[in-house]
Amino acid sequence: MRGITTVGAVCFLLLVFLVPTTSAGSSPTIYYVSTSGSDANDGLSWGGAFATIQRAVNIASPGDTIIVGDGTYVENVTVNKENLMILSENGATKTVMQTPGPYKSVFEVTVNNVTISGFTVKNTIEFHPEDPRISYIRIPVAGILLSQVNNCDISNNIAENNSNGIYLYLSSNNTLRNNIVKNNGNGILLERSDNSALENNTVENNSIGIWLVYSNNNALRNNIFVNDGLWVSESYGNFVENNTVNGKPLVYLENESDSMIASAGQVVLVGCDNITVKGLDLSNTSIGVELLGTDDSEIINNNVSSNLYGIYLYNSSNNTLKNNTAENNQYGVWLYAWPGELDNNTLENNTVENNDVGICVHNSSNNTLKNNVVENNMRGIYLLSGSSNNTFENNNILRNINGIYLDFSFNNVAYFNNIVWNSEYGVFNESGDALHAENNWWGDPSGPSGAGPGMGDAVSEYVYYELWLDAPVGAYGVSVRISPASRSGKPGETLTYTVTVSNTGAENDTYSLEVVDNAGWGPMLSENSLTIAAGAWDNVTLNLTIPDNVASGDQTVVTVTAISRGVPIVSDSANCIAAAEVVGAPPPEIPWVYIGVAIIILVTISAALVRWLWKGAMPKAVRLFQLRM
């Protein structure tokens, strides 16, 4: 006889209290499913269990219960009998359901009042050949799919590794409780589904944790988001309470004004006005900050990194995004609006780097982007779908694959920007309407390359680039000097130099310092960065130890470079020389035998000279001396 665990006991209590009767005076039938069963059985006991859940559903009548034994089941189950309860015997970790092939849900519920509890559902795939982000519109597929149904209870399940974990499509008044939804594309997706309760779910490591699409008046309570979060698309009147994102509050405000948000793991503003989001770390979530129909608000000094979207504005106007850091997102900042909606947002002094798309302007107009650093993205600034009358000025658009990319966008202007070091194009325009891009610095005084005549970043057709600048834009400057210009020392000796960095610009700035040498002697600086006020200077020490194994007279050229962090294309370098001293050569060693021979030769010559002087030369000299006397 099979034992009944705690989970099994709960299931049988549900039978007693929750299962409706099929007719007056009759009791519901319980059907059993087991991996060791057979669909030829009657399913009325464990010994006569069915092999598949679908067989049990087909046999069951409204109001019946199906209990599924431990194991792994590979099937797509269509639940088309109302008031069915489908329960696992011992909970989700023991009972695993997965699809035999792509493009079908594990459970697809097409009738009302169905309960599914205690299953792991996994590995469903939803495919759209053009854009996987909107695939739910074409092929609704999920671990558990509720399609045009009401009053269903989906609880105590694990949904993992699906395109959509749990998906409600045109389905209202349902309950999703105590589920673990992890590692899916969309964790829980509600599309055109209202008045449902999502409570006490753990939603973890999905691209989007919970996504409400045209879904109103739902209640989200006590859900835990880990490395994902909430996205609200054209959805209103939802009640969001006591949810957390990465251990911090999920702040959801709707139709509120004049507030400042001081602590949050994610911020969602719906129909709000004059809200300030300042100084927060809103990272590792689906969307750091979302504004839906929200105006006149400020997003300032936040870190919005490692998200699907860093900051997302939808039909939101007259907002200011300033001094934020958006990096390592799929989309750093996204401005999106329906045609005819007001925009007029300002993005200023933001750092947007290492995203797939840095700043996307999607059907959005009359926005101003100024003084931003847009660096190391695949597309730095991306305009598409009718975006018009946007202005880009004084931005540093650096090291992207494409600096500015336009697709079906009109009447936009870009001027006084530094557009340099972008690997394919500084500006690529396939919209057919010319971008006015005069008075930009393209990285070379000769102007842009590509459709341009110069050696700077490339431009495509439909770009007005004439009257380019011959120097970088900005009130930033730097000068580097090294003293002394040359020093020498013995091998093993450490040489010391003074490096002076001067801020020659009109703005305070921080400089990154780099040092290299051409012989690999390993010079080092006492500091790797300096913050210097406009017009001021500061010193660092350069130390270099001469290697022990260098030859006399060897030398290396040391280069120190200071790079502006305000405008990274502004830099300056200086050189100095370090040399190993030239030491005088010692006299060659002479073997002692040679010295002895030399002495003997010298003594012999001297003796012969004395004898000659005494016998011949000396007497003659004496006689001559006497005659003269």
Image: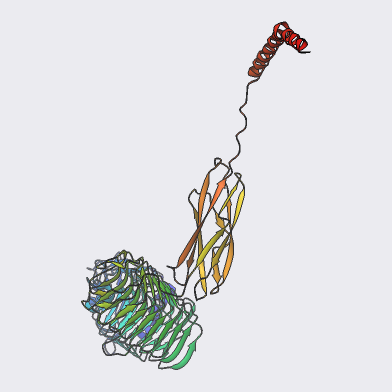
Residue at 58%, 41% in the rendered image: 582
Q: Is residue 572 above or below residue 435?
A: above
Q: Position of residue 46 (x, y in %)?
A: 32, 69
In the image: residue 210, left or right of residue 477: left
Which of the 4 quarters of the picture holds residue 481? Answer: bottom right
Q: Position of residue 294 (x, y in %)?
A: 38, 89
Residue at 48%, 91% in the rendered image: 259
Identify the image's colour scheme: rainbow, by chain, secondary structure or one colour. rainbow
Total number of numbered labels?
Answer: 0
Could you tell me which quadrant the C terminus lies in? top right
Q: Nearer the viewer, residue 300 or 148?
A: 300
Q: Nearer the viewer, residue 507 or 22?
A: 507
Which of the 4 quarters of the picture holds residue 401? Answer: bottom left
Tell me if I can see residue 253 in this picture. Answer: yes
Q: Nearer the viewer, residue 100 or 212?
A: 212
Residue at 29%, 80% in the rendered image: 29
Tell me if I can see residue 141 in this picture. Answer: no
In the image: residue 360, left or right of residue 484: left
Outermost residue to the top: 615
Q: Is residue 123 above or below residue 144?
A: above
In the image: residue 282, left or right of residue 69: right
Outermost residue to the front: 628
Q: Is residue 420 above or below residue 576?
A: below
Could you tell me which quadrant the N terminus lies in? bottom left
Q: Position of residue 479 (x, y in %)?
A: 51, 66
Q: Position of residue 470 (x, y in %)?
A: 36, 70
Residue at 39%, 80% in the rendered image: 370
